Image (cartoon, grey):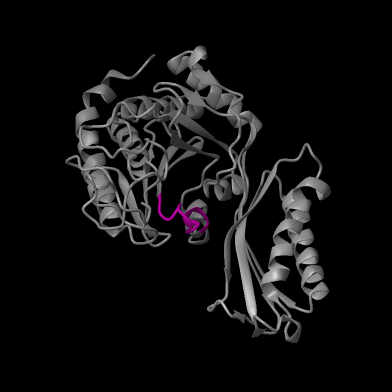
Amino acid sequence: MRILPELLESQLEIQTIRRDIHTHPELKFEEFRTSDVIAKQLKSWGIATHIGLGKTGVVGSIEGALGKGKSIGLRADIDALPLAEHNTFSHASINEGRMHACGHDGHTAMLLSAAQYFSTRRNFKGSIHFIFQPAEEGGGGARVMMEDGLFDLFPCDAVFGMHNWPGIKEGYFGVTAGPMMASSNEFKITLTGKGAHAALPHHGADPIYAVNQLISSLQSIITRNKSPIDHAVLSITQVHAGFATNVIPDDAWIGGTIRTFTTPVLDLLEKRLIKISHSIASAFDCVADIQFHRNYPPLINHVNETQFAVQVLEDLVGKECVNSSTEPTMGSEDFAFMLEKKPGCYVFIGNGDGDHRSIGHGMGPCHLHNPSYDFNDRLIPIGASYWVTLAQKYLST
């Protein structure tokens, strides 16, 4: 493993920043303190710093001393989750109901470490843009930053992202060309019928019975409408109806999520969901109201940039530590918006199995979005070495 010694030397300094951010988590578009910490660090290292893109986003830019050339964007997310932390170690969250349970504090730390390295080593052509993005967790912060002019103000020939991944060994990486993460979409279907006394159901149009039929019928989209070789998930996660045991209510509704790796499959699933919902409602003398929201598109890694990233990783940690055919996940990521606009690649860095956690961690597993999670600080110099090596090699080609 070719970890840059300068990054090992600064590990404790950057770890302190990471743990401070973990202690003070902030939710989407509320990351004012976090943004301030990031901006102050960048400015202290003499890096040109822009604040306010996407409301709370920060971009640090470094121009190479060898003249004009290509430009590369390196992105980290900075927001936390609305989750109560179970850990009690010294850097646990002090903001009630908020927690860095997905490692965005660690992503921020790795990118800050790379920025610090380049602040005193500018012997390259071109420019590096360090993109600290808010609101990945449900806010679409990547899209909002772009709407605010991210790539107009900071042109990038390619963009790259990285996320820690529990279950992958520490020091190992995972990536694949093409679909890496799924689209994220949500729906709410309300069936309105006619309320009645529960002892006289024939006087009404029972929306609960209709909803029961709808839940079963929607699964036929996965098993009978899409091709078996196209991956997709349709999950009903909410069912709401009624207020008394002796009353058939006027309406009932269900909610859920759809995940796909391609837009054509998503188009098919949405079309069939709408048609089936209206048909089931009509069959039981109800009316369907359907709300369907496309939140994040599928994250599609570009082939050339993925091959480039794989080569950088293999040179850095060894071919045996890089899985270039990592199984895609049905989870989603708003870095997908950036990859729709710019070529690039998104990789997983192994967070290990949780044995890195300090005394005082919760009893749950060290999984993402888990109240016992904590980022593995030993990854800071590894991830930062990837960022530095990636940028150096990209700008030299």
Quadrant of residue 229 in the image? top right
Quadrant of residue 31 in the image? bottom left
Position of residue 262 relative to residue 283, above or below, is above
Q: Give the range drawn in magenta.
A: 133-143
Q: Is the magenta stretch mostly helix, strand or loop?
A: loop
Please tell me which residue lies in front, 289 or 214: 214
Please tell me which residue lies in front, 206 or 265: 206
Position of residue 273 relative to residue 387, above or below, is below
Quarter of the picture containing the C terminus is top right
Query: Where in the figure is residue 89, as x and y percent of width and height?
Result: 19, 39
**Is residue 134 rendered magenta in the image?**
yes
Query: Where in the figure is residue 351, as x and y percent of width and height?
Result: 39, 29
Query: Where in the figure is residue 261, as x and y percent of width and height?
Result: 67, 43
Query: Where in the figure is residue 198, as x and y percent of width and height?
Result: 64, 80
Q: Can residue 357 be seen in this view?
A: yes
**Viewed as shown, does residue 206 lie left or right of 365?**
right
Q: Residue furthest front?
A: 199
